[in-house]
Image (cartoon, rainbow, N blue to C red):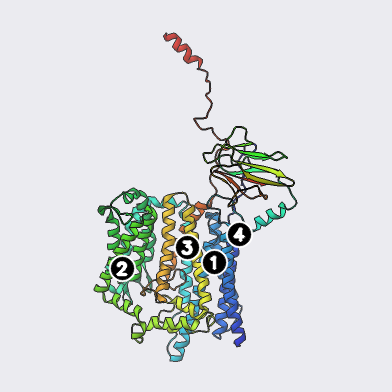
């Protein structure tokens, strides 16, 4: 790097640490942990422990090393903690899915059925696709501010993606009661996961442009400035969108996620607590409406209040998950030594209880802290970045991860009614994984903008105009002569 | 698989997970100041500064932030006056600084900072300076918008 010319007496600024070394170190550490987890699973499941496991660990490291090189190339100042956190979560998820695969194959052979298809191979393929998209986003989006130009397009595409499964016939779009899918051939994707990203981009663009509208003073009530009624339209539209998702796609989680994200972005953009109050009122209204209108919501609430009253029916899944968490206790049973496969959908919606059974409270807490590190680094980039679009975008993306984690873990641990969302990076599910890799790539892009050194300021400070000495400027001789000739 | 090995791998794996977390948190701590524009205090860097600070005296005063960022004053045995007054050694153009804001003076091997009754105060790192306080090498002294440090 060529040193910029320095004025005499001015110290050269020390080179900013990029953190790429730390990132690689942490990635290697994550690879060690994941390989360790795989070995423990294999040993506990009485499989052969061979050097193949080591090669799998190295392959995992290689995959993320490629992503690391992409970051080095295209976002050299990006946050060093985001990629390793994601890598560790994804690796643990893969090991756990593999572990559940083994359990399912075991059960199938006991019952004399054909072994079910391996989910982990699919998930590995999705990871590779996700990392490819990750690199593509890092490569194509060189400055996150260019995304603001496509804000309205993104919003339009997002709404279409979100609405598409609801409009398609149920044979294509319905899986387990939720119409969230587009299934063509054997491959299904959930367009809602991608719509999430697009709509965050749109909300950020929209709120940066129309921020004044939302901060216009309205009526003052209970010590808060409330907005004028006619400025409520965007909130009502978002609310309608969420309810629409609930009505046409029967998905509580996505509906909650979208409304939550918009509300938080509105709050961050305006710094008005009144938006939160209004939003919560809307939310409560929507919740009451949904409870009274939709049977599936009522079932969810009843299961949440008392899963054991209908243990062999609707409460079975969450009841088993609670038993699993209880079996795990503080220290867990050890990877591969529990029975997490007793919970239906242990590899996707109930990944958290599977992990809880085998890693215990101590392990769950560490995973939660890793999620927290990921979220705080995203929010920190939002604080540090110097443009408001970037701030809102990074906040929205980090908050989307945070809310999703809260909704999933809250649902599994019976804190809130269960919703069908996946744990980012941990759960089985291709669309979620791929979309979240794109999300992380955007976060890295913004954190790169936040941490990159400022362009060098002129090294000779210019005196402020008021203090600049008056200079005597010689009048050009030619002009003097011309005036003389006129006179 | 023997029970003992199972228990050991179980505990070992949890320890490994938390080790990762602690390492990550250490990195978080090391650049806590980066976004606010303050210099990142890396764990290794501060140790190096401490090591070099032992037995060495301050030779230079460096302005690290503020309008004068980058200026250096070579120290001799004379005290340094800082403020908006014209006869200050370091003359600040800062609405947050007082006319005679602070003095940094040597006493034996060490340098001491003293607030001269300024309106907005002088801060050594995070602590407000009330009486004469020793300034270690590399620790930021804040005066209004300006941050200075002693360097060897």
Q: Check contact, mark 2 vs mark 1: CB within 8 A.
A: no
- Disc 4 or 1, which lies upstream in sequence? 4
Crowd tier of the residue under label 4, counting other residues whose Cα lies within 10 Å: few below 14, some 14–19, many 20 or above: few
**Chain on which label 1 sits:** A
Secondary structure type for disc 1 = helix
For this rendering, which residue is in front, A193 or A383? A383
| Whether labels 4 and 1 share one chain | yes
How many neighbours does mark 2 have within 10 angstroms: few (below 14), some (14-19), or many (20 or more)? many
Residue under label 1: A63
Q: Residues within 10 Å of mark 1 (few under 14, many from 20)?
A: some
Residue A106 % position (x, y): 48, 87
The residue singled out by tag 3 in the image is A375
Q: Where is mark 2, residue-wise?
A: A165
Answer yes or no: is residue B152 visible. Answer: no
Circle 2 SS class: helix
Residue A132 coordinates in the image, percent (x, y): 48, 63
- Numbered circle sitting on residue A21: 4
- Looking at the image, tell me whether mark 2 or mark 1 is earlier in sequence order: 1
Residue A64 vs residue A299, the one in the foreground: A299
Give the residue at x 57% y 71%: B18
As helix, strand or loop, the secondary structure at mark 4 comes to helix
Which badge, 3 or 4, comes first in the chain's sequence?
A: 4
- Give residue B146's mark: none
- Residue B33 vs B13, above or below: the answer is above
């Amino acid at each position: 790097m060529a040193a910029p010319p320095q004025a005499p007496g001015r110290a050269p600024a020390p080179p900013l640490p990029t953190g790429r070394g730390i990132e690689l170190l942490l990635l290697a550490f994550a690879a060690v942990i994941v390989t360790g987890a795989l070995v423990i699973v294999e040993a506990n499941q009485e499989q052969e422990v061979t050097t193949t496991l080591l090669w799998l660990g190295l392959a995992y490291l290689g995959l993320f090393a490629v992503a690391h090189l992409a970051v080095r190339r295209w976002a050299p100042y990006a946050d060093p903690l985001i990629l390793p956190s994601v890598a560790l979560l994804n690796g643990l998820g893969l090991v756990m899915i593999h572990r559940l695969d083994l359990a399912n194959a075991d059960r199938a052979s006991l019952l004399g059925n054909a072994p079910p298809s391996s989910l982990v191979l699919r998930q590995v393929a999705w990871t590779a696709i996700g990392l490819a998209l990750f690199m593509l986003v890092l490569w194509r989006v060189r400055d996150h501010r260019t995304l603001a130009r496509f804000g309205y397009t993104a919003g339009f595409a997002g709404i279409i993606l979100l609405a598409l499964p609801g409009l398609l016939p149920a044979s294509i779009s319905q899986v387990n009661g939720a119409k969230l899918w587009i299934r063509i051939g054997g491959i299904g994707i959930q367009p809602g996961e991608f719509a999430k990203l697009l709509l965050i981009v749109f909300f950020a663009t929209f709120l940066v442009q129309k921020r004044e509208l939302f901060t216009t003073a309205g009526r003052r009530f209970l010590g808060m400035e409330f907005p004028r009624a006619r400025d409520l339209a965007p909130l009502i539209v978002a609310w309608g969108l969420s309810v629409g998702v609930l009505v046409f796609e029967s998905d509580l989680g996505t509906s909650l996620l979208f409304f939550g994200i918009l509300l938080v972005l509105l709050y961050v953009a305006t710094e008005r607590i009144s938006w939160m109050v209004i939003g919560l009122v809307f939310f409560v209204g929507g919740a009451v409406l949904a409870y009274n209108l939709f049977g599936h919501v009522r079932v969810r609430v009843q299961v949440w209040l008392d899963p054991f009253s209908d243990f062999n029916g609707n409460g079975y899944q969450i009841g088993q998950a609670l038993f699993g968490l209880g079996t795990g206790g503080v220290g867990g049973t050890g990877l591969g030594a529990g029975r997490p496969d007793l919970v239906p959908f242990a590899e996707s919606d109930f990944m958290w209880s599977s992990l809880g059974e085998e890693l215990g409270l101590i392990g769950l807490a560490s995973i939660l802290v890793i999620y927290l590190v990921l979220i705080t680094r995203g929010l920190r980039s939002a604080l540090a970045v110097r443009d408001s679009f970037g701030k809102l975008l990074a906040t929205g993306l980090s908050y989307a991860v945070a809310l999703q984690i809260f909704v999933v873990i809250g649902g599994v641990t019976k804190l809130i009614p269960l919703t069908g969302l996946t744990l980012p990076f941990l759960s089985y599910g291709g669309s979620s994984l791929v979309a979240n890799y794109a999300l992380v790539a955007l976060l890295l892009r913004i954190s790169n903008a936040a941490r990159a050194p400022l362009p060098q300021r002129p090294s000779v400070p210019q005196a402020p105009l008021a203090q600049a000495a008056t200079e005597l400027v010689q009048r050009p001789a030619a002009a003097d002569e011309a005036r003389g000739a006129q006179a | 698989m023997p029970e003992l090995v199972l228990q050991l791998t179980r505990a070992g794996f949890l320890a490994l997970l938390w080790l990762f977390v602690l390492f990550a948190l250490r990195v978080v701590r090391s650049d806590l100041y980066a976004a606010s524009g303050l210099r990142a205090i890396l764990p290794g860097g501060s140790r190096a500064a401490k090591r070099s600070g032992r037995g060495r005296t301050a030779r230079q005063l460096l302005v690290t932030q503020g309008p004068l960022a980058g200026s250096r004053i070579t120290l001799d045995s004379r005290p340094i006056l800082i403020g908006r007054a014209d006869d200050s050694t370091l003359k600040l153009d800062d609405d947050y600084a007082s006319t005679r804001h602070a003095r940094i003076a040597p006493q034996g091997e060490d340098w001491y900072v003293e607030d001269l009754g300024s309106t907005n105060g002088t801060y050594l790192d995070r602590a407000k300076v009330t009486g004469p306080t020793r300034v270690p090498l590399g620790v930021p002294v804040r005066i209004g918008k300006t941050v200075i440090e002693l360097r060897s």
